[in-house]
Amino acid sequence: MSDIDWEHWKLEKNLPLWQVMLLSLGVNPDKVRIKRIPESIFISLEPEMKFESIADRKGYKDQDFDKRLSILIERRFEEKFESGTKKIDLEKFVNWAIKSDLSIPNELKSLYGKLVTKEQFQIVDGKLFFQSQAQFNSVKFKSQEDWVEVIREVVKLQCDQELNKTKLDEKFWSIFSEGYLAAFRAVGPMGKPIKASTIVKEAFSADHWWTRNIKRE
């Protein structure tokens, strides 16, 4: 059984990089003290760590910690899980780690659903997707703008492939889009499924997107 209070760390939200590094390896940050530099008010990105006991290291060597720390340092800006002032957004890091197949404890994985932006969401042909949907985890959109743009791209893709152009109306495609997101087990920023009525209101009707972008034949 893990000695880490995972729910506590989830509530902390933004953590120093070294604490996220330890959590990602299943090591309890509460069992570690770091050497502070008297001349500096900040903690180095690569702190000198002192464990309360050998057992608290969980069998890891210094080079194991250094290797994982270097990954976080190198990727924190590129993958946008840096939250400023040398801290890491734990939720964004976890979702990046899952997406990148980085080995992290199952307890850490289970704290969050997969958080995605429009750039990260995989828009695929419906037939291809439904053949392989089991591989996808539940996803949660970061913002309304993200899921709106994804819906529009999905509809454009499917409209191009639709032979029966008489089907091209808002009701048909809003229901299709609702089902598409449901298959991904995708939810909006508030954690609730995105309904067809919301899709019509926020994605299709806004700025007259439907009439401007979809050409009926």
Image (tube, rainbow, N blue to C red):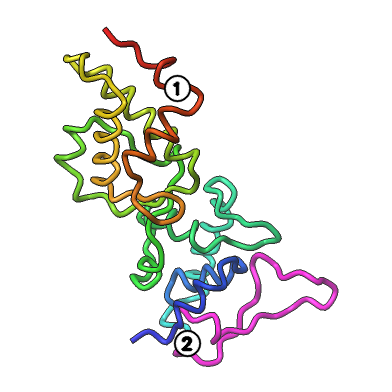
Taking depth in this image into account, of 209 and 39 the one nearest to the observer is: 209
Residue 148's label in the rendered image is: none
- Identify the mark nearer the N-term, 2 or 1: 2
Residue reaching furthest bottom?
53
Identify residue type, mark 1.
Trp
Residue at the extreme top: 217
- Image height of 146 relative to 189, above or below: above
Magenta span includes 31: yes
Tag 2: amino acid: Asp
According to the picture, the residue beneath numbered tag 2 turns out to be 56
Question: What element does badge 2 sit on?
Answer: helix
Q: Which residue is mark 1?
A: 209
Residue range in magenta is 27-56
Residue ID at (36%, 51%): 139
**Predominant secondary structure, magenta span:** loop
Screen quadrant of the C terminus: top left
